[in-house]
Amino acid sequence: MSYSVEVDFAPMYECIASLNAFLYKQNHTAMDAGKLWVREVQDRFAPVQLQKMREVISLAEDFNLNPYIWSCPGERTVHGFLSWFEELTTGELFEISGRFGQSVPANLPELRSSAAEMLRVWDAGYFSGIDPQILAGLQSEADRRRETLGGGNDLEVYEQATAGMRLYPAEQLKRIILIPQYHSRPLVTTAFYDEFVFTSYSCDVLPPEEGRPAAALLRLTRALSDETRLYILRLLTGRQLSFTEIVKQVGLSKSTIHYHLIALRAAGLVIVHSTNKSASYSLRLEALQALPQQIGRYLET
């Protein structure tokens, strides 16, 4: 059993990523952009618009637009995708969802209309005004990452792109679509379907201010500056542990361990051994071994 990996990017993916980064409060503390960015963006919208966005997201639940973006045959800018998306017949909407084995709400046509309206508001109020270097950088990252594929190294490319996620072959899984994203850095998100997996991975496409350390170096040094996180790394040395096992051995709450694992994952310090139904963790020595070189390069330049 094996799967193939492909890399895909379109502005519409990042439009969705930016909207999700803004609306999902549980991720705000973990994101590089943080709550300051959320407050700045929030001021661009009227309260009634914000309420409408939250209502649509709540109705959509786990419904994901990535399969539709990937299936779109034409221009996948916000305008290009939404024009195609809104013209799909009810049968075509359900056919695309069915192809991926996605859970489809009965009110899909109405949900499509509400989602398209919400995305146009989001684009007008925020996304159309983002730094164009973000989209250019994400496209360059996708092109570069795509060139590394070939010769049976798909699993390795996936692990490198996600800084430590290993997705093991499963009976039905045939294809993984890797999507570079900027707004939710350093989070990596994965949506599982019957034969497909969509993984959005974090990319630092904008350079740091002159003289400042790169975001990747900051994540690594911050992750290593905490006693609990160092203890977790020691527990993971030479073995794999589940989340429940880590919680039990560290003796802290699940929410606290979850927070620490996000920091360790963001720094690339742990390997996430993942299937559709479970995950376990082990130490990723690659990131530790690269630390002296990263610090040295920063100090010298």
Image (cartoon, rainbow, N blue to C red):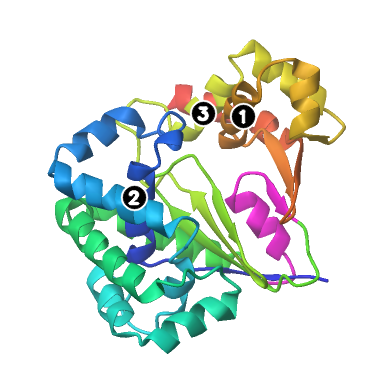
Of pointers 1 and 2, the one earlier in the residue sequence: 2
Q: Which stretch appears magenta?
A: 149-167
The disc placed on residue 84 is none
x 31%, y 64%: residue: 115
Residue behind mark 3: 219
User: At which x and y percent is residue 158?
Assistant: 64, 57
Q: Residue furthest front?
A: 106
How many residues crowd mark 3 within 10 Å: few (<14), some (14–19), many (20+)?
Answer: some
Q: Residue at x 70, y 74 (%)?
A: 174
Marks 2 and 3: in contact by CB < 8 Å? no
Toward the viewer: 276 or 209? Answer: 276
Q: Please tell me which of labels 3 and 2 falls first in the chain.
A: 2
User: Can the viewer see residue 229?
Assistant: yes
Of tags 1 and 2, which is closer to the observer? Answer: 1
| Quadrant holding the C terminus | top left
Q: Position of residue 167 (x, y in %)?
A: 72, 55
Disc number placed over residue 258 in the picture, else none: 1
Disc 2: which residue:
18
Q: Secondary structure at mark 1?
A: helix
What amino acid does circle 3 point to?
A: Arg
Sequence-earlier tag: 3 or 1: 3
* 1 and 2 marks in contact (CB < 8 Å): no
Residue 100 vertical placement versus 124 (above, below): below
Residue 201 coordinates in the image, percent (x, y): 52, 51
Marks 3 and 1 sit apart, C-alpha to C-alpha, by 16 Å
Q: Position of residue 178 (x, y in %)?
A: 55, 62
